[in-house]
Amino acid sequence: MTKTKYHVTTVHKIAIFPFGMINAFLLKNSQGCILIDTGLPNTEKKVEDVLNKLKLTFSDIKLIIITHAHIDHAGNAAKIKALSGAKVIAHNGDLPYYRGEKKMHFCSTGWFGRLFSKTGVIQKPYEKFEPDILLTAKEKFNLNDYGIDGEVISTSGHTEGSISVVIDNDKAIVGDLISSGILLGGIVRTNKAKRPPFEDNPLQVSQELQALANKGVKTFFMGHGGPLPQKEVLQHIGKLKNIATDID
Ligand SMILES: [Zn+2]
Ligand SMILES: [Zn+2]
């Protein structure tokens, strides 16, 4: 069997909101590019600006990976899917939300989450879409066909259908499995881990983060703030375990 040839992949941050408040990511190598998360509805210009800087257009996007169903990640998926013609991969656990069949529930992790919930912004419905590739349970999706030494894996906990992307075994884009900064995330203290404003299951999150660290992931890219080094993530795992025991 011939080994697939890998090309160096770079992670480019797309600032949907500035100061790390909301990030999407573009993975790029000589084979093309993959978009991870799509940002809030009507923010495609932010994605286009980064594509243009790299001398690319929407049609260069070969795959769109949606880390989970919250509006700041999946809200513009339908539009970017139409603009790029790329396939969308997501996890079955969040499918009812992608299809607009169910309203999301939010487990607030603190005062900001509770206050933010009251604004109703996060519960706003967005244009529904049908993922082309649907992961179930702990199923993985290999990115070798895209010339990338990486895989999409299930990392439930923030939401049931949360997924992460591991590249070159040492970098991961983890959506909202972990966050940093203040309020929604970003702005300041972007190097300090914290829980996102909403989190379904802290114990499960701690286990998924630990599994990523055990795999050898050294750098964690996130939807809000970051990136964080493994050391900071390990400290956060310890705190999450304590929260989980308090809840029990
Ligand atoms: Zn989220
Ligand atoms: Zn988010």
Image (cartoon, rainbow, N blue to C red):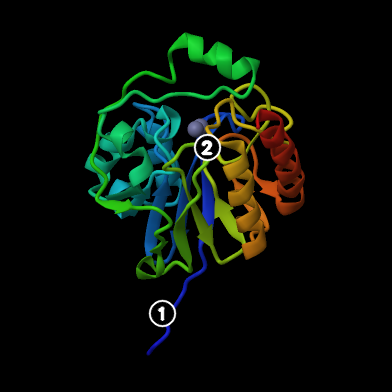
Kindly identify which numbered label has been placed on residue 44. Answer: none
The residue that disc 1 covers is 4
Under mark 1, the amino acid is Thr
Q: Nearer the viewer, mark 1 or mark 2?
A: 2
> What is the residue that sits farthest to the bottom in this orientation?
1
What is the x, y in percent for residue 35? Answer: 40, 48
Dot 2 amino acid type: His
Residue 60 visible in the snapshot? yes
Callout 1 touching callout 2 (CB < 8 Å): no
Give the crowd class for mark 2: few <14, some 14-19, many >=20 residues within 10 Å: many
Question: Which residue is at a point 49% across and 54% down the rendered structure image?
Answer: 165
Residue for badge 2: 158
Q: Position of residue 109 (x, y in %)?
A: 62, 24
Q: Is mark 1 within 8 Å of ligand 2?
A: no
The 10 Å Cα crowd at callout 1, few under 14, some 14 to 19, many 20 or more, is: few
Q: Is residue 206 above or below residue 109?
A: below
Q: Is residue 140 left or right of residue 186?
A: left
